[in-house]
Image (cartoon, helix red, strand yellow):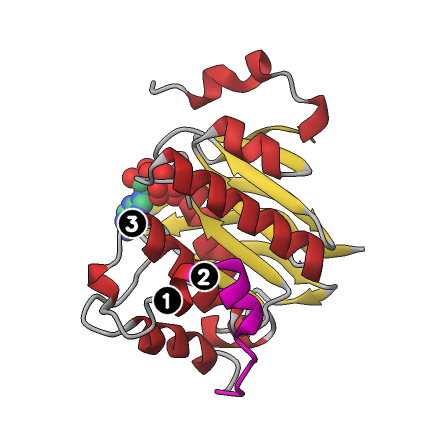
């Protein structure tokens, strides 16, 4: 059973086509990584899944239901959680207020945040602090917690390791694995940090210039095979 199945996705910024005929699927309960160098279209793929592109075509099935014509808020209500690149934490709002924003997408139904606090103790500890006073790694943890509070079925994570120190990267990796194992949440992870992606994901897709150029089970990937796609061109 597929959580998400994308076929023939094209996406555009104005007249310029950025994604060309992308096929990608996420099996239910699995972690799938999408890797590739800067500017190849990884973030655009996530935006397309959220319905944030002004022009896109192709088929996109969430648990066999076509979502291409649905608005972003409908996709969120259907269970897609999104943690954008740069995290989008509101600096003037407290951690608690930032977290509460995550509830908006599920109609404000209060979820028990206990499991989030277990995953990310720092979030509970700093509930009263301003979002802007948190470090990059703490903001990333808050952003993931904010997406999880709505109990998504599928979580889209855009470069969670970007600008974060190694020890915190380990913690975030551990939290992502725990969420997946304990709740069966399906995850699409966009990354430039290849080792992190291969370590966490069950499957790996490589994107280059808006196309999928490689796909395999992570365990079968030989790094030398795809490394050249990761280097700056
Ligand atoms: N708002 C925009 N308007 C026009 N072109 C854009 C816009 N955002 C991205 N692009 C272009 O679309 C292409 C794909 O960008 P995208 O951000 O999806 O790449 P990426 O693989 O996620 O890289 P990064 O890691 O740098 O975000 C790039 O050529 C980029 O310049």
Looking at the image, residue 186 sits to the left or right of residue 125; the answer is right
Quarter containing the C terminus = top left
Real-space CA distance between mark 1 and mark 3, rounded to the nearest whole angstrom: 16 Å
Give the mark toward the camera: 2 or 3.
2
Q: Are marks 1 and 2 in contact (CB under 8 Å)?
A: yes
Q: Position of residue 111 (x, y in %)?
A: 55, 81
Cβ of disc 3 within 8 Å of ligand 1?
no
Classify the position of ligand 1 by quadrant: top left, top right, bottom left or bottom right. top left
Q: Which residue is mark 2?
A: 121
* Disc nearer the start of the sequence (2/3): 2
Question: Front-most of 180 and 80?
Answer: 180
Is residue 111 covered in magenta? yes
Cβ of disc 1 within 8 Å of ligand 1?
no
- Residue 125 numbered mark, or none: 1
User: Tag 2, which secondary structure?
Assistant: helix
Asked if 67 appears above or below 14 in the picture, the reply is below
Is residue 165 covered in magenta? no
Q: Are marks 2 and 3 in contact (CB under 8 Å)?
A: no
Q: Position of residue 53 (x, y in %)?
A: 40, 59
Residue at point 30%, 39% (across, down): 163
């Amino acid at each position: 059973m597929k959580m998400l199945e994308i076929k023939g996705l094209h996406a555009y910024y104005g007249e310029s086509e950025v994604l060309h005929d992308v096929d990608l699927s996420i099996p239910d309960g699995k972690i799938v990584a999408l890797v590739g160098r800067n500017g190849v279209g990884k973030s655009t793929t996530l935006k397309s899944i959220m319905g944030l592109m002004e022009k896109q075509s192709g088929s996109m099935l969430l648990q066999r239901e076509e979502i291409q014509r649905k608005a972003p808020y409908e996709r969120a209500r259907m269970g897609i959680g999104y943690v954008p690149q740069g995290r989008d934490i509101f600096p003037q709002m407290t951690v608690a207020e930032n977290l509460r924003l995550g509830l908006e997408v599920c109609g404000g139904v209060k979820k028990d945040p206990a499991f989030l606090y277990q995953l990310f103790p720092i979030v509970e500890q700093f509930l009263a602090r301003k979002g802007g006073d948190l470090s990059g790694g703490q903001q990333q943890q808050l952003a993931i917690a904010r997406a999880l509070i709505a109990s998504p079925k599928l979580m889209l994570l855009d470069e969670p390791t970007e600008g974060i120190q190694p020890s915190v990267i380990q913690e975030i990796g551990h939290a992502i694995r725990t969420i997946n194992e304990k709740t069966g949440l399906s995850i699409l992870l966009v990354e430039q940090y290849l080792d992190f992606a291969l370590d966490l994901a069950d499957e790996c897709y490589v994107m280059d210039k808006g196309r999928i150029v490689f796909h395999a089970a992570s365990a079968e990937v030989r790094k030398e095979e795809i490394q050249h796609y990761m280097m700056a061109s």
